[in-house]
Amino acid sequence: MGKKVIGVLVGSLRKDSYSKRIASYVSSVAPDDLEMRAIDIGGLPVYNQDDDENPSTAWVRLRDELRQVDGFLFVTPEHNRSVPAALKNALDGGSRPYGQSVWNAKPGAIISVSPGRLGGFGANHHLRQVLSFLNVYVLQQPEAYFGDVVASLDDEGNVVDESTKRHLGEFMDSFATWVRRFSS
Ligand SMILES: Cc1cc2nc3c(=O)[nH]c(=O)nc-3n(C[C@H](O)[C@H](O)[C@H](O)COP(=O)(O)O)c2cc1C
């Protein structure tokens, strides 16, 4: 069986983002049958339904990139107990024009990240709700809420905590099994 390509979408645009560090780490430890491909959602205009008939090149590019992947990994911080606007924007724009959603019927998984104790639980579950409507087959278990993320990183942002490494490795193994089961 060939490799499955996974689009990695990070909910933070911040240069030194902890979520970007976690996304980079899990991409580096993904099983060999997954090819992890970073998808940039930073330069997108705010989605406007009026533009569906004549979309900007940024939206055309994103939709093309997402159509080419076999599944999605979302690594996101929490903004005010929900998903950051940049990620919701990508989800909304990728779901249109009506009937041409790029998300439909593909496997996905969520890792939420926070310097706080709750590990982005609110963002994780708001994202689950949206992905359920978009018909993304979201990995149910194991869940991944990474709280106190700063304690797992060194000064350069490398993941150094052994327990965090083990959990993220197990999560990626489960996701690879999930992708094999649900991608066409
Ligand atoms: C607008 C805003 C809202 C935030 N709301 C939450 C929140 O609801 N829960 C939380 O744990 N952290 C919250 N934070 C703190 C973020 O978790 C923190 O800034 C984190 O470092 C962002 O992720 P990043 O490092 O990947 O950029 C918020 C930060 C911002 C800027």
Image (cartoon, rainbow, N blue to C red):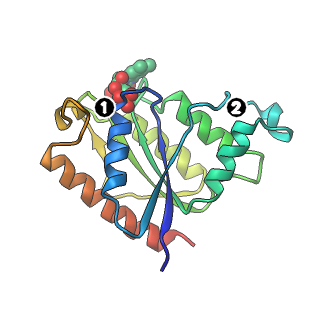
Quarter of the figure with residue 88: top right
CB of mark 2 near ligand 1 (< 8 Å): no
Give the camera-side residue of 177 and 30: 30
Residue type beneath disc 2: Tyr
As drawn, 75 above or below 117: below
Picture coordinates of residue 41 (x, y %)? 57, 37
Residue 68: image x %, image y %?
A: 62, 59
Q: Is mark 1 within 8 Å of ligand 1?
A: yes
**Residue depicted at x 65% and y 44%:** 62
The quadrant of the rendering that contains the C terminus is: bottom right
CA neighbours of label 1 inside 10 A, class few (<14), some (14 to 19), many (20+): many
Which residue is the extreme one toward the bottom?
A: 1
Q: Say what amino acid the circle numbered 1 marks.
A: Ser
Can I make out residue 95 in this image? no
Residue at the image point whose x is 55% and y is 63% from the top: 70
Please tell me the numbered disc located at residue 114.
Answer: 1
Q: Which residue is mark 2?
A: 47
